[in-house]
Image: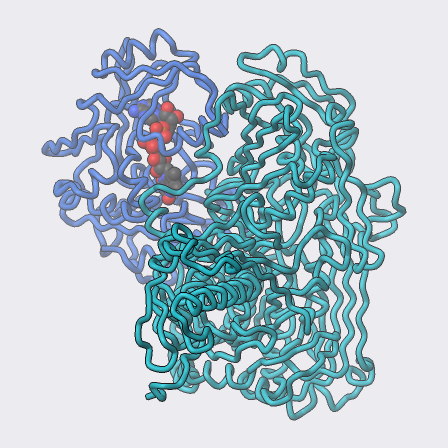
């Protein structure tokens, strides 16, 4: 029992909600069908947009005849690319710190050449979406199809057609990372060398609420209001201001409830920009809701990597060298403003990051191709990086007949070694790989499972166990985007004010897209300030009413936004205590706030309620000394400054069953040990991890955007694109280690992407563990039944 | 996407529906459970001028057990079949397959007639109907006729249904007391269309006699595998030599791959499904 007279610790106060599974207040609203999504908006005089998209992966546009469409019922306007040419400046997906990255300028609609199947070519604005679609069908476009460049490796061969005539080849960016010297390690005959070609298919976010825009333009004020389903309102504000040439302050971005984003809704899409342009040209609100078909064809895709990698280990299992070559196809342009080179960059930075590796060489080539654009999606680069390193590591363990846990024990960076700098130059601090692994071994009862495994195989069923040790990039500093010139804030702000009834109102620049951000904000504010969480009202997702900040992505919301809230709530508390001290003729240092009351710090005796204080200050200010002008509002901002990123770590394991007759993989069980620093809300963190693992399993087993050789997307419906479903998901057991980050008082790191980053490697390893006794292995994701049957030699490739 | 404009009629009787179909034949389409047609309308794959909704025609939604046959109205929904005692006792093959058709939300709406008329090559019901030796009862304003399930499914989404005709009902002979059945399908997720599946009936178990072996999800239409039946005829369900021959005979079948599963994999999986269905023959 703590000393009763000791002042209460920040996280240990009666109103501290830190570490508690506070239910999400907004969940009631959503369950009651009271969510407010963009498509729920019905504005007076609103019009609806539909887009005609290129049916070819690569084609010259010879003519566009819109006459019949313009005459079609309900049509107000029909636009082609040329109509917007003087309405918007082109955008370019480059960042200066990704030296050498190049991408041609992009416009909202294709002009002259269409470069992927699904690229918007023309737009109809009509009184309903159905009528707009009717008119789209009447637009007559003459195309001259060109050879499509699809495979990222072939795209770099000298004989490949070049997509952009201003460049000599299809290379967008290349990076080479070297640490130590890998060659001697691979040449040393005493070392065991394993080598693989790994392929990671494309998949996409499949948000429940699709990309959605409703844009209003007021010509009298020259103001634009953009109702947006997304995760970075201030970035969108800057992007629209720059390219529509409006003052930034004239643009308001509002994101109300957001039905999932996963990184999909954080980019500049031509159809969204065209919607804003049409709203300005017509001076009427325009709505564009992407349907599922166009979501598959135009929401960014993720991954698409073709990797050749090798690993050398000494006879005692020590990693001697790791080398990899990554080709990644990003579509015809680099996405704006985050670029499509970040995933490759992350892979080069993160492969093997949990381990002591002195000799490392990685080369990444980011390649243009005629497919939909590829860009940042949940756990950018992580699943690829973790799968490359950990699948090679487990393969090496098998070859030297060492247990896969043991080989990790020998190579993980020691918990007491931090801070350390990785071979790739990443600065790591406050990580706990060893602890996480041991906790995982205990949680999953590893030894017991291994014993059972040897007897569990019958008929065509083989069981396998796979692990992964991982890092996750969270809480990025300006080093991520800002230094490269992107209008993306790495800092976030929170304003906390107290009203006349003693309730708190928090507005914060991070965003809520279904993960419970607003609950976290309320928890931190209520706890730090000292009121019941019910008395905290949170506003996010509105550039007009929140401080400036980045939003929620890269697992940064709780860590950065949460810290801003903590600082602001604490500052407000000091203000309130100073005024209370005057009223109570006491000393601010001897007072505290608890459960909505000002109390004596020493004995917790109640002195006055915040309600009384609020009413006195706001209604009867005359009772205060003349020079006291309380504000009861505080704003604080926070950014990570000591490190480029705050890394987290974790260890995961999967147990799978492979039916070697059908090639079907059943995930029997899944375990996660995660160190995301201070856990603010265990339930929310666990659900983030579970959701992430499910998305990771999706990428590992089910989800793939399939293209024909000539660049046609083959499976643009939910019937053909397989998302992971509850029925196929295992129980996901989660344990935490809490090593708070020293970069903030709150100590929270991110947790939103860990599951997605780690699960694919664990699943792949488990499958290969199951297949190993049969002399088979697979290194392609998703590991579909057909691919597994091919690996087993049951069917020809 | 949004469906294009169409006229909508909801007749209360089969004869009214037939008349509407007759009057608007080129441009009208029937709406049953809508589980396939609604997505096709929204994807603008189907663009009828008129939709004739059969959902209020009660006479099409009954299950009648006669002495030799069970007659199932075309508007009988999967959920209704699942709940039916008659189906449970008389048609064990259909009964065991129902939980594999989509998910319960879809089974609440989807109808047996809709599935037969659609003739999706991966759908369970057409194969089940062939394996059950069912007949399809068709009506038009002019006449009615009966087409055996064997002859009804003619190709990829193609049937013997003629313009102006509606599937009125489906008659399934009650199996004899010695009959046995097998059903197995291979799917990646519960409720998905099968990568490969097979429905089997035989008039007796040992030795196997008068078999019907019908594959689905592997070709442009449900495929009755006569050679496979012959290989198994007069053997037992665990006669590995006969099973090997039966599997070998699949090489002669005109199979078709899809975007996830190539034709070689389909053939392999068809063999696996057959083996497993035979193991569970009951
Ligand atoms: C998510 C999802 C998963 C599914 N999974 C499966 C699955 O695993 N297996 C499976 O078999 N099916 C599956 N289905 C399809 C489902 O079974 C459909 O219900 C069925 O194929 C069509 O039946 P319906 O009553 O919905 O017909 P509708 O969609 O209303 O109509 C289908 C077609 O049949 C015609 N038609 C309907 N009734 C008649 C009639 N009486 N006479 C003549 N023509 C008629 C219509 O004009 C239309 O062309 C799935 C559907 C969905 C949405």
Vertical relation: B149 (above or below) A183: above
Quarter-of-image position of residue A386: bottom right
Q: Position of residue A570 (x, y in %)?
A: 50, 68
The quadrant the N terminus of chain A occupies is bottom left
The residue nearer to you, when weighing A318 against B135, is A318
Vertical relation: A278 (above or below) B235: above
The residue nearer to you, when weighing A599 against B99, is A599
State the residue at coordinates (13%, 34%). B68
Q: In the figure, is residue A608 to the left or right of B257?
A: left
State the residue at coordinates (54%, 72%). A765
* Quarter of the rendered structure image containing ligand 1: top left
The residue nearer to you, when weighing A277 against B221, is A277
User: Chain in cyan?
Assistant: A
The residue nearer to you, when weighing A410 against A784, is A410
Q: In the figure, is residue A239 to the left or right of A147?
A: left
Q: Colour of chain B?
A: blue
Q: Position of residue A508 (x, y in %)?
A: 53, 54
Vertical relation: A487 (above or below) B134: below
């Amino acid at each position: 029992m703590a000393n009763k007279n000791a002042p209460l610790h920040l996280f240990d106060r009666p109103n501290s909600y830190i570490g508690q599974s506070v239910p999400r207040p907004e969940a009631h609203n959503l369950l009651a069908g009271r969510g407010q999504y963009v498509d729920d908006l019905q504005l007076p005089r609103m019009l609806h947009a539909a887009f005609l998209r290129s049916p070819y992966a690569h084609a010259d546009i010879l003519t566009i005849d819109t006459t019949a469409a313009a005459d079609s019922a309900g049509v107000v306007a029909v636009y082609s690319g040329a109509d917007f040419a003087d309405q918007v400046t082109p955008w370019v997906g480059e960042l200066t710190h990704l030296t050498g990255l190049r991408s041609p300028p992009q416009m909202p609609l294709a002009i002259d050449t269409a470069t992927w199947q699904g690229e918007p070519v023309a737009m109809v604005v009509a009184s309903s979406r159905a009528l707009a679609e009717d008119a789209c069908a009447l637009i007559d476009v003459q195309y001259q199809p060109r050879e499509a460049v699809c495979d990222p490796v072939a795209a770099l061969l000298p004989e490949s057609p070049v997509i952009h005539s201003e460049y000599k080849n299809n290379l967008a960016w290349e990076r080479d990372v070297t640490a130590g010297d890998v060659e001697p390690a691979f040449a040393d005959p005493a070392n065991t060398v394993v080598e693989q070609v790994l392929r990671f298919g494309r998949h996409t976010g499949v948000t429940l609420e699709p990309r959605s825009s409703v844009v209003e333009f007021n010509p009298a004020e020259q103001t634009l209001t953009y109702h947006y389903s997304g995760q970075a309102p201030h970035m969108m504000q800057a992007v629209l201001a720059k390219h529509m040439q409006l003052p930034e302050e004239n643009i308001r971005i509002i994101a109300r409830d957001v039905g999932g984003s996963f990184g999909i809704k954080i980019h500049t899409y031509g159809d969204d920009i065209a919607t804003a342009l049409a709203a300005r040209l017509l001076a009427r609100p325009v709505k564009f809701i992407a349907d599922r078909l166009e979501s598959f064809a135009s929401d960014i895709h993720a991954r698409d990597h073709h990797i050749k990698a090798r690993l050398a280990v000494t006879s005692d299992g020590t990693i001697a060298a790791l080398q990899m070559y990554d080709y990644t196809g990003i579509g015809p342009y680099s996405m704006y403003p985050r670029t499509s080179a970040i995933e490759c960059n992350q892979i080069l930075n993160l492969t093997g990051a949990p381990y002591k590796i002195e000799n490392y060489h990685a080369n990444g080539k980011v390649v243009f191709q005629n497919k939909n654009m590829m860009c940042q999606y949940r756990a950018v680069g992580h699943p690829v990086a973790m799968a490359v390193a950990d699948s090679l590591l487990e393969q090496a363990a098998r070859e030297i007949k060492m247990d896969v846990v043991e080989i990790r024990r020998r190579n993980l960076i020691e918990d007491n070694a931090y801070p350390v700098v990785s071979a790739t130059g990443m600065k790591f601090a406050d990580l706990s790989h060893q602890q996480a692994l041991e906790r995982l071994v205990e949680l999953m009862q590893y030894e017991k499972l291994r014993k059972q495994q040897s007897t569990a195989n019958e008929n065509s069923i083989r069981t396998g166990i796979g692990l992964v040790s991982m890092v996750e990039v969270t809480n990025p500093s300006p080093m991520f985007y800002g230094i490269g010139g992107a209008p993306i804030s790495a800092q976030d702000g929170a304003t906390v004010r107290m009203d006349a009834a003693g309730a708190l109102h928090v507005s914060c620049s991070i965003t809520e897209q279904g993960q419970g951000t607003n609950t976290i904000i309320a928890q931190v504010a209520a706890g730090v300030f000292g009121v019941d969480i019910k008395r905290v009202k949170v506003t996010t997702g509105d550039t007009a009413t929140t401080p400036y900040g980045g939003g929620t992505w890269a697992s940064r919301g709780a860590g950065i936004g949460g810290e801003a809230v903590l600082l602001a709530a604490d500052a407000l508390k000091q203000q309130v205590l100073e005024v209370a001290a005057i009223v109570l003729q006491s000393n601010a240092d001897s007072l505290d706030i608890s459960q909505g009351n000002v109390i004596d710090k020493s004995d917790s005796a109640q002195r006055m309620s915040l309600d009384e204080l609020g009413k006195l200050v706001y209604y009867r200010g005359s009772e205060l000394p003349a020079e006291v002008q309380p504000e009861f509002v505080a704003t604080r901002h926070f950014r990570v400054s000591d490190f480029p990123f705050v890394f987290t770590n974790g260890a995961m394991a999967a147990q799978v069953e492979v039916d070697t007759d059908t090639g079907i993989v059943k995930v029997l069980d899944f375990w996660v040990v995660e160190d995301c620093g201070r856990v603010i809300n265990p339930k929310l963190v666990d659900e983030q991890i579970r959701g992430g693992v499910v998305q990771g399993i999706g990428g590992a087993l089910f989800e793939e955007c399939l293209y024909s050789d000539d660049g046609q997307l083959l499976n643009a419906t939910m019937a053909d694109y397989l998302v992971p479903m509850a029925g196929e998901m295992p129980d996901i057991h989660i344990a935490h280690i809490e090593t708070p980050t020293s970069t903030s008082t709150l100590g929270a790191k991110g947790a939103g992407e860990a599951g997605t980053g780690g699960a694919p490697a664990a699943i792949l390893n488990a499958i290969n563990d199951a297949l190993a006794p049969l002399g088979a292995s697979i290194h392609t994701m998703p590991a579909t039944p057909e691919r597994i049957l091919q690996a087993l030699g049951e069917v020809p490739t | 996407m949004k469906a294009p404009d169409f006229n909508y009629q909801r007749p209360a009787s089969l004869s009214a529906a037939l008349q509407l179909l007759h009057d608007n034949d080129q441009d009208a389409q029937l709406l049953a459970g809508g589980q396939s047609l609604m997505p096709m309308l929204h994807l603008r794959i189907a663009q009828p001028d008129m939709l004739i909704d059969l959902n209020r025609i009660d006479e099409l939604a009954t299950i009648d057990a006669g002495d030799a046959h069970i007659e199932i109205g075309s508007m009988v929904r999967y959920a209704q079949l699942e709940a039916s005692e008659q189906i449970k006792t008389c048609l064990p093959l259909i009964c065991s397959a129902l939980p594999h058709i989509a998910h319960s939300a879809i089974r609440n709406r989807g109808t047996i007639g809709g599935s037969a008329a659609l003739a999706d090559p991966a759908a369970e019901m057409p194969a089940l109907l062939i394996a059950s030796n069912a007949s399809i009862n068709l009506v038009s304003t002019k006449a009615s006729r009966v087409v055996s399930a064997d002859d009804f499914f003619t190709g990829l989404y193609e049937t013997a249904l003629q313009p102006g005709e509606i599937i009125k009902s489906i008659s399934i002979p009650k199996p004899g007391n010695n009959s046995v059945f097998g059903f197995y399908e291979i799917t990646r997720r519960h409720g998905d269309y099968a990568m490969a599946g097979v429905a089997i009936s035989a008039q007796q178990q040992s030795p196997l006699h008068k078999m019907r072996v019908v594959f689905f999800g592997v070709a442009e239409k449900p495929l009755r595998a006569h050679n496979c039946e012959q290989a198994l005829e007069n053997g037992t369900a665990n006669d590995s030599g006969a099973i090997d021959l039966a599997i070998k005979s699949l090489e002669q079948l005109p199979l078709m791959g899809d975007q996830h599963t190539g034709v070689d994999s389909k053939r392999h999986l068809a063999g696996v499904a057959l083996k497993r269905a035979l193991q569970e023959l009951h």
